[in-house]
């Protein structure tokens, strides 16, 4: 499955692990996104067009609890899968931290 930046109809789509990996183009860069099965809110991003093979990042969204009683049982709200726009925002945040000379964060 591929979602290009111009495809506005897919912006609110919420891919899940059962959909399999999908490709996003963000600011001219290509990423393969894998939503982790059994880990709500967790995704892995492989930077396919980046200068360093196998480099990318992972993102995690935490469960929030309204009270201590919730924590003892279950969260008040289920974590919703991220929208395509939310995946794009995560990728843009990653790219903003990458050193353009090395292609890595922190170098």
Image: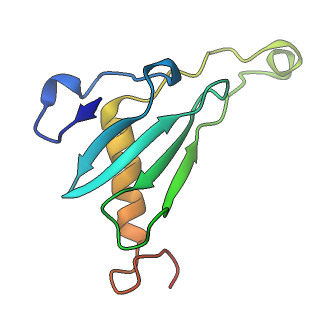
Q: Is residue 80 above or below residue 25?
A: above
- Lateral position of residue 2 relative to residue 61, left or right: left
Q: Position of residue 90 (x, y in %)?
A: 41, 49
Q: Residue at x 50, y 18 (%)?
A: 18
Q: Position of residue 74 (x, y in %)?
A: 78, 14
| Quadrant containing the N terminus in the rendered view | top left
Q: Residue at x 43, y 33 (%)?
A: 21
Residue 70, quarter of picture: top right
Q: Residue furthest front?
A: 53
Q: Residue furthest left?
A: 6
Q: Position of residue 45 (x, y in %)?
A: 46, 49
Q: Residue at x 61, y 16 (%)?
A: 78
Q: Nearer the viewer, residue 67 or 29?
A: 29
Q: Is residue 87 above or below residue 70?
A: below
Residue 92, quarter of picture: bottom left
Q: Is residue 90 above or below residue 80?
A: below
């Amino acid at each position: 499955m591929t979602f290009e930046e111009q495809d506005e109809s897919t912006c609110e789509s919420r891919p899940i692990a059962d959909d399999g990996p999908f490709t996003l183009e963000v600011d001219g860069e290509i990423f393969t996104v894998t939503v982790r099965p059994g880990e709500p809110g967790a995704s892995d991003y492989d930077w396919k067009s980046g200068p360093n093979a196998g480099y990318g990042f992972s993102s995690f969204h935490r469960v929030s609890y309204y009270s201590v009683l919730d924590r003892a049982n279950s969260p008040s709200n289920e974590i919703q899968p991220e929208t395509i726009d939310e995946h794009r925002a995560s990728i843009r945040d990653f790219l903003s931290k990458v050193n353009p000379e090395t292609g890595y964060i922190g170098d």
